[in-house]
Image (cartoon, rainbow, N blue to C red):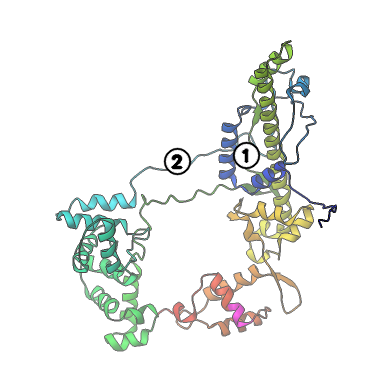
Amino acid sequence: MLKQSLQYKLLQKLSPQQIQLMKLIQLPTQAFEQRLKEEIDENELLESGKEDENEFNEDDDNEYGDDGTETIDAEDINIDEYLSDDEIPSYKTQTNNYSPDDDDKQIPYAGGTTFNQHLLSQLRTFTLTEQEEIIAEFLIGSIDESGYIRRDLYDLVDDLAFTQNTITSKEEVLKVLKVVHEFDPAGVGARDLQECLLIQLKRKSTNAIRDLSIQILEKAFDAYSKKHYNKLFLKFNCNEDLLREVNTEILKLNPKPGGGYAGNNKIAEQIIPDFTILIVEGELELSLNARNAPELRISSEYNNMMKGYKETKNKTKSQKDTIQFIKQRLDAAKWFIDAIKQRQQTLMLTMNAIMQFQSEYFLTGDERKLKPMILKDIAETIQMDISTVSRVASSKYVSTPYGTKLIKTFFSESMKNDKGEEISTKRIKKILETVVLEEDKKKPMTDDKLALILKEKGYPIARRTIAKYREQLDIPVARLRKKI
């Protein structure tokens, strides 16, 4: 027997407009500009242009179905609500916290040739058989952006057979690879760091130091890379001064021959700060990047269509469908413009709270002045959700008197010092970095020693925590920091 029952549920759902706002808040400046262009392209009623003093009436009551889609009838539309007395209605979406003289610079990028094309052009200067050319082109295509071929020769032989229908051998591939090693930049096509450095050294004119450098890299690369200098002294019968000269010679070489090529496939990311913080007469001043405050307006073309519809006595189905379409596009334009306004307000409100919280740092530039700050601290200050603060801090930058900074780097956990005071972990990392920088490089300090020094400075930290912070700061272990 079937039983029927009623069940009540209270569900909280974000409206399409709220979802749109959340997505806009998360976008950094460049992505926001792209989103803006896409919306203008998609919505015929939305266009960029200077603002007008008259604002369009935004009050309308629409009914929506359970699925969030609008259910309207053209006959129910009050045309007067959508007609503006002004010929060019617009919406004021810009903020007044930046100067009209602000630069809006676009950085052009040179087209140039790619790294791969640069290598292929050099291939034409060598005399090779048809099969050797196929192998060489395949090897060039296997070179990564750092300039290395990181695949085993047997794998390359198999791939040539399956993808290029070229039957070859390891010896033939190695022979062609030696040709690629003659390309510029020196070291390109190497299979590992050892081979890369040796290729570069052998390209140079010979002298005693370079000859010894080649011997050390060929016969004791592992000992050299791990800085086991005592083993090198015994093996090559050299003293500290001679080994220091060898070290200087090797350090001049390029470990990533492809990384510095100007025409590489990857274009350096252009960072555009979303905010600017200035110190004016001892006070902090925050402004939003002008590119985050676009001038938008509703197109005037729809106005004539609305007037024509209103004046027509016998309205056709086609006219009704057109007016219904215009009304939907107009509402979408209004929603988008309103979301931009709210985005600007949320960005400024959040960044201002961060600036005030970390005012000591922004006034001095001293990273040791950074206070412990988590997303919850700012969320409580501006009375917004933590997720909103996270969206503002994500992938956004602020220009400060001390350089352009990623906003999320101002957030950090806290620890207690020996006086019981809450201090930022960033402050501890900065002190650790300074201690390592000032250490005697001939006798670098172990993690235990570093923990002891920080404890003496008032920061009781365990050795494993020192190791964790050291790794986060990309500081190698003591043995690898040793210099002769």
Q: Is residue 159 above or below residue 327?
A: below
In which quadrant is the N terminus drawn?
A: bottom right
**Residue 215: % across, % down:** 25, 78
Q: Would you identify the image quadrant in which residue 252 lies?
A: bottom left
Task: Tell me how far mark 1 sits from mark 2, CA to CA.
Answer: 19 Å
Task: Determine which of the numbered discs, if any, sits on residue 439 in the image.
Answer: none
Q: Residues within 10 Å of mark 2 (few under 14, many from 20)?
A: few
Left or right? Give the position of 149 relative to 337: left
The residue where tag 2 is placed is 108
Of residues 35 and 323, the one drawn nearer to the viewer in this rendering = 323
Main secondary structure found in the magenta portion: helix
Left or right? Give the position of 249 relative to 442: left
**Residue 393: % across, % down:** 65, 54
In which quadrant is the C terminus drawn?
A: bottom left
Question: Which amino acid type is marked by label 2?
Answer: Pro
Would you say residue 465 sits in the magenta stretch? yes
**Residue 210: % across, % down:** 25, 73
Question: Which amino acid type is marked by label 1?
Answer: Ala
Secondary structure of the residue carrying numbered label 1: helix
The residue where tag 1 is placed is 290
Left or right? Give the position of 479 relative to 248: right
Q: Is residue 50 visible?
A: yes
**Residue 211: % across, % down:** 23, 75
Residue at image coords 63%, 82% = 462
| Mark before the other along the chain sequence, 1 or 2 | 2
Of residues 442 and 235, the one drawn nearer to the viewer in this rendering = 235
Secondary structure of the residue carrying numbered label 2: loop
Q: Residue furthest front?
A: 1
Residue at image coords 66%, 26% = 325
The span picked out in magenta is 462-466
